[in-house]
Amino acid sequence: MKEKEVPQDDGMLQGKTRDLYYVLDENGNYVNALSTGWEPKNIVMQQAWDIINEAVAGVRDQVLRNEASTLLYHMEKNQMDVKLLSQYSGVSKAKIKEHIRPGGLEKATQAEKEAYADSFRISVEQLLKLDDPDSHHA
């Protein structure tokens, strides 16, 4: 790709990040060039976020139907499974599985709740409730 062909299609990450490309300048030398976005990539990223937001909404509904605790909601929102949350929080996988069941998070110790909250970078108060449904990513 030539330097003047680097795509500059604004997308959801506009102003937040840019992609680095190695391109040919007018002398045929490789140089760095930054792109604000590329339409096909922007479309795929939006589709991925739509899928993630749909999954988060589904888990939110499960919590509202008392089929799971808010811990499962925050795991889904942060794209974490039991193994990953265990690695981040230091809480055993067995305990996490217990805590994602309806009413299970109430059985967690304060230290476990704090470990979960720290893993999600939220407060314990936020851990114990659902977010506003319109506060999803993208």
Image (spheres, rainbow, N blue to C red):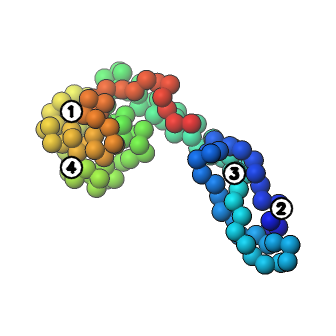
Q: Secondary structure at mark 2?
A: helix
Badge 3 is on which residue? 36
Specify few, some or many for label 1: CA neighbours under 10 Å numbering under 14, 14-19, or 20 or more: some
- Tag 3 near tag 4, CB within 8 Å: no
Q: Earlier in the sequence, mark 1 or mark 4?
A: 4
Query: Alpha carbon of mark 2 to alpha carbon of mark 3: how far?
Result: 13 Å
- Tag 2 near tag 3, CB within 8 Å: no
Q: Earlier in the sequence, mark 2 or mark 1?
A: 2
Query: Alpha carbon of mark 3 to alpha carbon of mark 1: how far?
Result: 45 Å
Tell me where residue 68 appears, x and y as whole percent: 31, 30
Q: Residue at x 34, y 43 (%)?
A: 120
- Tag 2 near tag 1, CB within 8 Å: no
Tell me where residue 50 appears, x and y as whole percent: 58, 36
- Quadrant for the N terminus in the image: bottom right
Q: Earlier in the sequence, mark 3 or mark 4?
A: 3
Specify few, some or many for label 4: CA neighbours under 10 Å numbering under 14, 14-19, or 20 or more: some
- How many numbered marks are there? 4
Q: Secondary structure at mark 1?
A: loop
Is residue 119 depicted above or below 87 in this figure?
above
Q: Secondary structure at mark 3?
A: loop
Residue type at numbered disc 3: Thr
- Tag 2 near tag 4, CB within 8 Å: no
- Quadrant for the C terminus in the image: top right
Q: Earlier in the sequence, mark 3 or mark 1?
A: 3
Residue 91 - label: 4
Q: Residue at x 28, y 55 (%)?
A: 87
Badge 2 is on which residue? 4
Badge 1 is on which residue? 104
Q: Earlier in the sequence, mark 2 or mark 4?
A: 2
Q: Residue at x 13, y 38 (%)?
A: 109
